[in-house]
Amino acid sequence: MRAIILAAGSGLRLGQHTKDIPKALLDLNGKSILERQISLLRQHAINEIFAVTGYQREKHTLKDIEYIFNPRYAETEQLASMMVARTKISDDVLIIFGDIVFDEQILQQILVSNDDIGIAIDLDWEKSYNERPDNPKSLADKVLIYQKKIQQISDEKAEEAVKTIIQWIGKNPEREGLKSTPKRVIKAFKEYFQGYNENPENYLTKTFTEVEGYDDMVMEKNIW
């Protein structure tokens, strides 16, 4: 197993605390957030670790990890950083936000999971957002859970992620012909994964998305 830590952000909301240092390198009782994450990973024999950097990347000097630079860190979010490291995504891999301090128990629960995809979720998330007036609840990544399975991730966040991918390949997601692409992609994925609980015959002949022009046709080819 390997781990990819997304640590390109500047941490603007932290003001002076991140003026000269990346958020992932903030000191917490003698250890940075990134050091704490790496220490936990190595305690569980995860030694192949990649960190995607951006803001103040020269400050990242920890040994025995591989750094990958996101040159567009200032205009993109976590998904773009993950795209920079996409060649490292193979077999079992952990994707970790570089500004999260998490308990060892969280990591253990992820590691023992037999699911194809697992996500660590804070069920008491609203409490922490009540203490963050500068970061409203509307910006939180929300999921719908039923019988311990994730049924849905908030469409708004998912659509923003698709827009990020479109920007990353050099296209303008706001131009005519691409504006509706994020909604169509999310709809397609919903229908695709819903098929795990349905009769496959209902989906073998189903059209997932519309193709309105040549650019969309190229996009569909690349996605599927």
Image: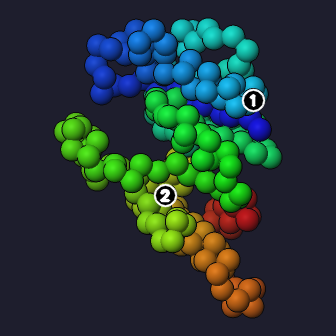
Q: x, y (%) of residue 122?
A: 41, 49
Earlier sequence position, callout 1 versus callout 2: 1
Q: Residue at x 55, y 34 (%)?
A: 104
Identify which residue, 165 or 137, lies in the foreground: 137
Q: Is residue 96 visible?
A: yes
- Residue 42 location, quadrant: top right
Tell me the CA gap for discs 1 and 2. Answer: 32 Å
Instruction: Provide the secondary structure element on which disc 2 rests.
Output: helix
Which residue lies under the disc numbered 1?
45
Q: Is residue 160 visible?
A: no
The C terminus sits in image quarter = bottom right
Q: x, y (%) of residue 87?
A: 77, 38
* Number of numbered discs visible in the structure rendering: 2
Relative side of 189 to 92, left or right: left
Q: Residue at x 28, y 42 (%)?
A: 128
Which residue lies under the disc numbered 2?
158
Instruction: Provide the secondary structure element on which disc 1 rests.
Output: loop
Name the residue type under label 2.
Answer: Ala
Dot in front, 1 or 2: 1
Q: x, y (%) of residue 110?
A: 62, 47
